Amino acid sequence: MAVAELTAPTCPKQGLSSAQLSYLSARASRSRRLSFRPLRRTHGSRISCSVNQTAQAQAPAAVQPEVPKSSKPKPECFGVFCLTYDLKAEEETKSWKKLINVAVSGAAGMISNHLLFKLASGQVFGPDQPIALKLLGSERSFQALEGVAMELEDSLFPLLREVQISIDPYEVFQDVEWALLIGAKPRGPGMERAGLLDINGQIFAEQGKALNAVASRNVKVIVVGNPCNTNALICLKNAPNIPAKNFHALTRLDENRAKCQLALKAGAFYDKVSNVTIWGNHSTTQVPDFLNARINGLPVKEVITDPKWLEEEFTEKVQNRGGVLIKKWGRSSAASTAVSIADAMKSLVTPTPEGDWFSSGVYTDGNPYGIAEGIVFSMPCRSKGDGDYELVKDVIFDDYLLKRITKTEAELLAERRCVAHLIGGGVAFCDLPEDTMLPGEM
């Protein structure tokens, strides 16, 4: 899975020059020219809503947490999104839901470049859900972030009512109902996995603290930056006021790849493949589960009668897909990663089809499978479409599957020991048995 770059693990400090501070666009003039001015560095600020709140419809949003109110000054929004829309004069908007706030970190990166337009167009939340996008970047990427906001302006999405850009997570996360944490430092040459865990762990610890301070108490968090399972654990441990169940590590791209490979092998279209689970870590220890998967409603092992392919080639193909893609065209899988993030979100705001499930890395406390508690582990989930989920109980295991699950569980426990200093677990001790970074993520 590709990652976007985020360089600053902590919030900007006072005393920086104005050139180092984030900028937001001033209100668009009548001639539509944009100008920029420094943003006041306030941690409790909230952008003004360009939707006329008194005219909003009564239909509930997919996720409606209680939002803490802020009495501090409101920073400017970006460009045309600062204009006030009179919903009373717009026939189309009378049935629209309440505005939903979505934060995206690493917003100037390639994954976000694909994802933001899916969000703004209504592909995730539906054609009647107005959205506010709050975009988090770094000092180095801020000019690119302005360019992203300009492209969103030029796309004329009716549902996109607000855009805010900043390098301060306390501003971007204010009152958000969704936080998509894509930004992370990519792994460079010679960097050990343990080093990446520590560097990115500091980023996600700070973002967890910011979410805990200013986000909605029912915010849904999807961690994409790698190593995403343990980064999600760090984030949730630093946000004690937000339910641990609300944090997800993205393993949906792995699930999508597994469905594709099963469909190709069976000679079926991929919409005929269901009940696919990715167990464990987003690494080479991940376990694509063919035992519980189905094709055209039949168990996979009845359709694909080649156990050697299932036990060896299938898993390897899923794991190596990203690396093969890079060799083919020299780029990481940013577009398919963005699609998988959208899929993961839709799985939480849309009722799961009867009998099916989806994969997500979630907190293991109380799980019915006997997996160690206190880690973020990909497991099969179902949702009623209310933003929440429950773990699937009607799954079967055999010796092969259990052995593989035990291995990925051990790796996540080792990763947890590596970041003990970031999750209140005392002194960190790193004893990772091997390098398990997926091909294509370095």
Image (spheres, rainbow, N blue to C red):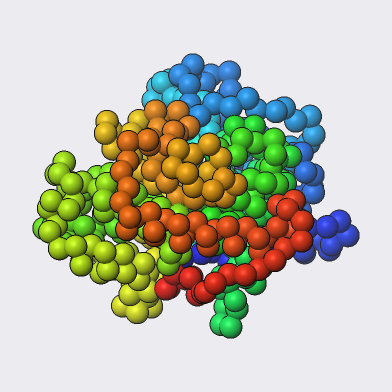
Q: Report x, y in % for residue 336.
A: 36, 59
Residue 159 or 349: which is nearer the viewer?
349
Judged from this view, the residue extending furthest toward the front is 399
Q: Is residue 324 visible?
A: yes
Residue 249 or 341: which is nearer the viewer?
249
Image position of 324 (left or right of 341):
left
Residue at image position (46%, 61%) is 407
Q: How many marks?
A: 0
Residue 251 or 166: which is nearer the viewer?
251
Q: Is residue 102 visible?
A: no
Q: Residue 288's image quarter?
A: bottom left
Q: Is residue 262 above or below residue 246?
A: below
Q: Is residue 416 above or below residue 381?
A: below
Q: Report x, y in % for residue 79.
A: 60, 47
Q: Residue 380's image quarter?
A: top left
Q: Report x, y in % for residue 146.
A: 59, 58
Image position of 304 (left or right of 286):
left
Residue at image position (35%, 30%) is 351
Judged from this view, the residue extending furthest toward the bottom is 190
Q: Is residue 32 above or below residue 60?
A: below
Q: Report x, y in % for residue 282.
A: 46, 60
Q: Residue 202's image quarter?
A: bottom right
Residue at image position (12%, 59%) is 305
Residue at image position (58%, 57%) is 413
Residue 218 or 24: which is nearer the viewer?
218
Q: Where's the N terminus, which quadrant?
A: bottom left
Image position of 320 (left or right of 411):
left
